[in-house]
Amino acid sequence: MDVISIARPVTGPASRFLSGAGLLLRGIGLYVRSPKLMLLGIVPALISGVLYLAAFAALVWFVDDLAALITPFADDWSTVLRNLSRVVAGLAILGVGGLLGVVTFTAVTLVIGDPFYEAISERVENRLGGTPGAVDVPFWSSLRRSLADSLRLMALSALVGVPLLVAGFIPLVGQTVVPVVGAAIGGWFLAVELVGAPFYRRGMRLPERRALLKADRPTALGFGVAVFVCFLIPLGAILVMPAAVAGATLLARRSLGQSTKEG
């Protein structure tokens, strides 16, 4: 498959980034206009949302202890410097925890809601003219592949999160550059994860979808970063996830050179 020719960029990076973000808005429009899609989407997101809110609340509860644990070098410092270092450490822990939560929330929710989101994605594709090159993939086989790919992406996001945690200690950079880099990296992982369903329907695995998205990275980043920012809003992930799946279906079709117009 000639990846470059299928997804060749046609405008500037900034325009493509905004166009990618616009796919999320289109996904929201498709989702809210269909009560059936809304019913399909809310159950798995609610289950994951409750689990992750509980996990983040626990992180907040123990953040002081964790900050002290990773800053033993500050034990002999003055009270002001010791407290300041641990406040910075606590903010870094919460920041990285939020990043990992946003990224892994997608993977976990997709596993829980695999049949629900598969149905949403398929119905969106039917509105756009069907699925060219569709293959019959048994449910358990699809779930197993989805889980394996999700675990791979979660591992990669964790590897990225560790350097970001360290960089979070750097004054100014840790509070300015790191969040932007984190949003870009988190957005990329979200885009790769969310387009899984339409690619699986075509018999395509993680390496193929990653290559196609790389062929037009600004569009994929625009979509992923928009989803990432929405997921940072309290309850945003629960509300936006199904629409993000619809938008990801549009992104997958665009990367494959297929129609994204209803008709």
Image (cartoon, grey):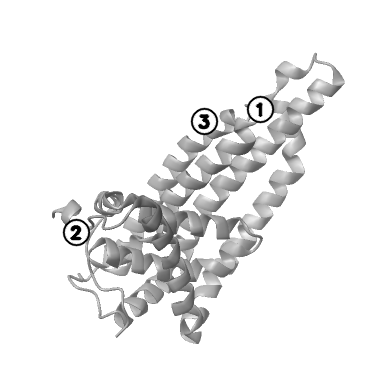
Q: Secondary structure at mark 3?
A: helix
CA separation in Å, label 2 and label 3: 34 Å
Instruction: Give the residue furthest to the left.
Output: 1
Quarter occupied by the N terminus: bottom left
Q: Is residue 198 above or below residue 9?
A: below
First-in-chain label (1 vs 2)? 2
User: Which residue is label 3 attached to?
Assistant: 163
First-in-chain label (2 vs 3)? 2
Instruction: Give the residue furthest to the right.
Output: 79
142 to the left or right of 236: left
CA separation in Å, label 1 and label 2: 43 Å
Q: Secondary structure at mark 1?
A: loop
Q: Residue at x 49, y 73 (%)?
A: 28
Crowding at label 3, few (<14), some or many (≥20) Cα neighbours within 10 Å?
few
Q: Is residue 69 above or below residue 229?
A: above
Q: Is residue 133 above or below residue 171?
A: below
Crowding at label 2, few (<14), some or many (≥20) Cα neighbours within 10 Å?
some
Quarter occupied by the C terminus: bottom left
Q: Residue at x 69, y 44 (%)?
A: 59
Residue 229 percent coordinates (x, y)? 56, 56
Can the viewer see residue 144? yes
Residue 10 percent coordinates (x, y)? 26, 58
Amino acid type at circle 1 is Pro
CA separation in Å, label 3 and label 1: 15 Å
Residue 123 percent coordinates (x, y)? 36, 80
For the residues bearing labels 3 and 1, Cβ distance under 8 angstroms: no
8 or 107: which is nearer to us? 8
Can the viewer see residue 147? no
Q: Nearer the viewer, mark 2 or mark 3?
A: 2
